[in-house]
Image (tube, rainbow, N blue to C red):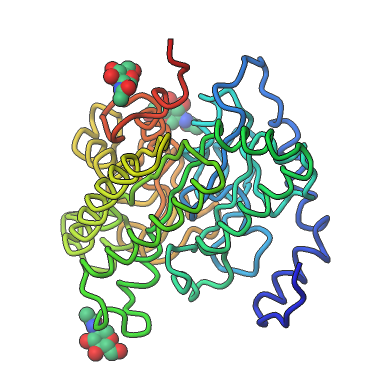
Amino acid sequence: MKMAPMPLPLFFFFFFVFLFPSLFSLQENSQLSELTTPPSLPSPLAPALFVIGDSTVDSGTNNHLLTLARADHPPYGRDFDTGRPTGRFSNGRVVVDYLALRLGLPFVRPYLGLNGKVEELVQGVNYASAGAGVIFASGSNLGMHLSLKRQMQQVSDTYERLELGLGEVAAADLFTKSVFYISIGTNDFTHYYFRNTTNIRSLYLPWEFNQLLVETIQHELKNLYNLNVRKVIIMGVAPIGCSPHYLWEYNSVYGECVEQINNMIVQLNFAMTYMVHKLNMELDGAMFTFCDAFEGSLDILRNRDRYGFVSTTDACCGMGKYGGMIMCLFPEMACKNATNHVWWDQYHPTDAVNRILADNVWSGKHAEMCYPMNLQNMTTPKT
Ligand SMILES: *[C@@H]1O[C@H](CO)[C@@H](O)[C@H](O)[C@H]1NC(C)=O
Ligand SMILES: *[C@@H]1O[C@H](CO)[C@@H](O)[C@H](O)[C@H]1NC(C)=O
Ligand SMILES: *[C@@H]1O[C@H](CO)[C@@H](O)[C@H](O)[C@H]1NC(C)=O
């Protein structure tokens, strides 16, 4: 590691993570030990699952950071396998938990909670950090987080450790056969563009801002490819214009979504589909796929009765109109049963929604939302 002088936030980061790792990981280890071995051990469809992203897939990274964006307290996790908070922004599982099980892998553990042994890395790690954005500054108002760029550095570090531990050929083979899952971009809207941070809305028109996001993600996909990664799921941004927070903030009367926000997300997802299509043509052997979480979520909102949802506008856990005014802080703020709610807190869906989206990523079970293929196509050996 280079010993250049560190900026202050980075100093605190190292201070907390490296001086008090035991303090931070004690509780978590006891929770996870029950989960690291699946009950039956079918041969996994991929050697590992690596996760990059934000609060949609954070599985405990932010428990190690000084930030307001944390889900390490009840009622988060109350419907999770352990019934306890883990750092996941959900009452239960997040999408990648369902996908890990589909692949025959254990739940993916946060990189920051590990001590760096190769055995801990070979089935995959989760780098995702709540509040993180594609753009470095996104989410800074919440406190510390690991942006896309920082997470990519951790991916490189992981690769180097695998090379040292397994040898170059085995490390390359592991990355080639593994599945990478990227879910990021929401905070670039919620905690950057729509807050008009640093006057961004005067500097970038919506389509220009989207272009910036797409180009940055494209750049990182090429970096992954150069690390021998071939199988990548890129999850699009969900209709956060329908989230309780924005219904509250924009004074939605009947629960109608905020079009201005959703339109921008639709355009982003469209541009992402095209970019991923182009990369697949350009990069030999690349199996990149874009999953349009917006389409998948609209299907749920439109067909709520079929899925058994009673509320599509109100957060199960929150306060104010639609439960969208403040974040979920105490068990007393939560509804009794989250299974008939689409939204768990002011920004995040419930376990029930995550399960449906995961089914769609896996096989398009309820709605086709992945182009040009779903995860099952990607991991089923060709016969
Ligand atoms: C963004 O902020 C700048 C000044 O900070 C202001 O001039 C501009 O009108 C704002 N844009 C929007 C869309 O709110
Ligand atoms: C929540 O409701 C669903 C059906 O709406 C039911 O199957 C489930 O048992 C309930 N869970 C709890 C904890 O009450
Ligand atoms: C993916 O698998 C489905 C069946 O699950 C099949 O119908 C479809 O043609 C496959 N798509 C590709 C691109 O291989």
Name the residue: 26% across, 36% down. Answer: 300
In which image quadrant can residue 17 be found? bottom right
- In the picture provided, is 27 more to the left or to the right than 60? right
Residue at image location 66% in from the left, 34% down from the top: 123
Q: In the image, ligand 1 is in what quadrant?
A: bottom left
Between residues 372 and 345, which one lies in front from this camera angle? 372
Placement of 244 over or under 281, stated as above or below: below
Q: Is residue 12 visible?
A: yes
Quadrant where the C terminus is found in the figure = top left
**Measured from the top left, where is residue 248 in percent x and y?**
28, 64
Give the residue displayed 63% in from the left and 56% down from the top: 154
Image position of 59 with respect to 379: above or below:
below
Closer-to-camera residue (135/311): 135
Q: Position of residue 325 (x, y in %)?
A: 37, 66
The spot of residue 364 in percent (x, y) is 31, 26
Question: Quarter holding the N terminus?
Answer: bottom right
Is 227 placed above or below 176 here? below
Q: How many marks?
A: 0
Q: Is residue 365 visible?
A: no
Pinpoint residue 327: horizontal percent, then vertical percent. 46, 62
Pick the front one: 332 or 26: 26
Q: Is 21 placed left or right of 143 in the picture?
A: right
Task: State which quadrant residue 293 falls in.
Answer: top left
Rendered view: 30 above or below 322: above
Q: Residue at x 22, y 36 (%)?
A: 299
Front residue of this view, candidates 123 and 338: 123
